[in-house]
Amino acid sequence: MERGTGTSSLPARLYLLACDVEKDQLKWGDELGYAIRAATLAELEARGCLKDDKGRARPAGGHRTGDPVLDGALRSIAEHSRARRWRSLVQRERRETCLAVEEQLSGAGVVSVERRTLRRKRVTVRDRGLPGALRAEAVATLAGTEPVGRVEPARAALASFAALARLCPELNWRVRHQHRRRLKELTARAGVAGPALKKALDMRAAANSSGSAGG
C-alpha cells in the first residue's frame, strides 16, 4: 500500500489484517468495528486532529487529513456541541466507519467485495500476502523485546488493537496471556483510544455475559 492513497492508514491496515485470504472472508463479529473505530480515533489523535481534554476527545484547530474516512469521522465528532468520552466514541458509528474503510479499500483496488444474499460477503485481497504480513508484524510487536517506549504508536496500536479485538488466530489466547503485561503497555502506547477500546470491549463482554446468564 502506498502512502497518500489513504489505504495505508491504521484503520485500513487493521481491516486488511482481519481478512482471511484462504476463505476470502472478513473476521466475523462486531469486534472489528470496535477496533477500526478505535484505530480511526488513534490516527486522528496522532495527526493532531483530536486532543484529549480531561478524558474527552475534542477536535483540534480545524485540522483535516485529506483522508475521507478520517475526515468523515472527525466531522461527525465536531458536529456535537459537547465533547464525548473516548470510550463512547469507540462505541459509536462502528458499522459506518468499518464500511467506509471497506469502500475506500475497494475503490483503491486493494480489495474486492461481493455481497451475497443470505451468505457472508466475499472479501478478496488483491495482494494475498498482505494480511499475513500485517499479522506477522502485530505478533512480532507483541512478542518482541524492543522497549515499548521505542515502539511507534501506530505499530503499538496495530498489535494491541488486533489482540484486544481478537482479529486473527495468530493472536490467540495463549499469545495474549503470555504477553499480557506487554499488551497492556502497548495499549497505553497507542494513545488515548487504546485504553478506551479495552474498556469498550470489556463492557461489551460484560453485557453479553449478563444477557446469557439472564436468558
Image (spheres, helix red, strand yellow):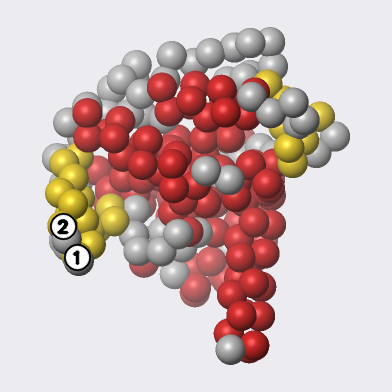
**Disc ID at residue 71:** none
Few, some or many residues within 10 Å of mark 2 (<14, 14–19, 20+): few
Q: Position of residue 182 (x, y in %)?
A: 63, 56
x and y percentages locating residue 157 in the rendered image: 54, 43
- Picture disc at residue 119: 1
Instruction: Residue at 20%, 66% (x, y): give it.
Output: 118
Packing grade of label 1 (10 A; few <14, some 14-19, many >=20) is few
- Marks 1 and 2 in Cβ contact (< 8 Å): yes
Picture residue at 24% right of the left edge, 43% below the top: 130
Residue 7, image x, y percentages:
32, 29
Residue type at mark 2 is Arg
Q: Nearer the viewer, residue 99 or 146?
A: 99
The image shows residue 207, relative to residue 41, as above or below, that is: below
Q: Is residue 62 left or right of residue 137?
A: right
Q: Quadrant of the N terminus?
A: top left
Instruction: Using the numbered discs, state the Cα–Cα distance from disc 1 to disc 2 in whole angstroms.
Output: 5 Å
Position above or below: 158 against 142: above
Residue 150's spot in the image, x, y percent? 61, 35
Residue 57 left/right relative to 178: right
Q: Is residue 144 visible?
A: no
Residue at left offset 60%, top offset 61% = 201
Whether residue 117 is visible, yes or no, is yes
Q: Is residue 165 above or below residue 141?
A: below
Judged from the image, the secondary structure of the residue bearing numbered disc 2 is strand
Q: Which mark is residue 116?
A: 2
